[in-house]
Amino acid sequence: YDGETREYISTSTEYLAVGVGIPACSCLDAPVTHKAGYAICRSADFNSWEYVPDHRGEIIYSTETGESKEITAPGDYPENTTTIAPLTPYDEWDGEKWVTDTEAQHSAAVGAAEAQRQSLIDTAMASISLIQLKLQAGRKLMQTENTRLNAVLDYIDAVTATDTSTAPDVIWPELPEA
């Protein structure tokens, strides 16, 4: 048997000289018959064989953090785990099932929408940076540049006025064509 997990590995026939003991991690008694879903292991007192639940290869989820982990050793499921996967990063375990914390989910969606708003404004500002440079230098704008500047400024006003409290269902205005 395995010295660390006490799991039955194999059977072998050993011929021993007089006065020599059996090899380490071996037993004289035969293991019990294989049973599906269980590993055959030596008991804690090393006097008999026992069935130990075998969930190796299964994925479990922490009921505290939702993190997944693969089971790699025989034994019962660890404390504070479940085989039921959370559906969202905002799920919390209620003792029987995952329940989505809709407030946290909405708050994160609003935060993402605010970041999206800033990204759209930054992109719009970058698209008129050359026009702004001309204005700062006191140069006169061509009609197309003036039209573009006003269209982008109107777009920035529309993005700024967009209600992000409806996230994730925010409808953003389209950036005017260059």
Image (spheres, rainbow, N blue to C red):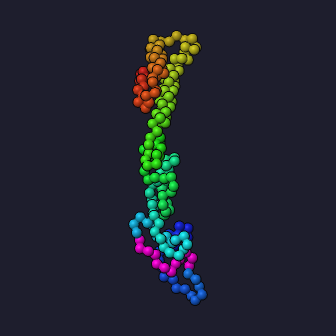
Q: Residue furthest left?
A: 36
In the rendered image, residue 14 lying in the magenta stretch gets the answer no
Res 57 quadrant in image: bottom left
Residue situated in front as seen by the camera: 65 or 131: 65
Q: Residue at x 55, y 86 (%)?
A: 16
In the rendered image, residue 29 lying in the magenta stretch gets the answer yes
Q: Please report the bounds of the magenta region as a residue range.
A: 23-34
82 up-or-down from 132: above or below: below
Residue situated in front as seen by the camera: 30 or 126: 30
| Res. 8 visible in picture | no
- Tell me residue 55's x, y (percent): 45, 60
Q: Residue at x 52, y 71 (%)?
A: 43
- Tell me residue 5's x, y (percent): 53, 67
Q: Residue furthest bottom?
A: 18
Residue situated in front as seen by the camera: 154 or 106: 106
8 up-or-down from 168: above or below: below
Q: Residue furthest right?
A: 19
Q: Residue at x 48, y 56 (%)?
A: 70
Q: Main secondary structure of the magenta part?
A: loop
Quarter of the image that includes the C terminus: top left
| Res. 41 visible in picture | yes
Q: Residue at x 56, y 79 (%)?
A: 23
- Tell me residue 59's x, y (percent): 45, 54
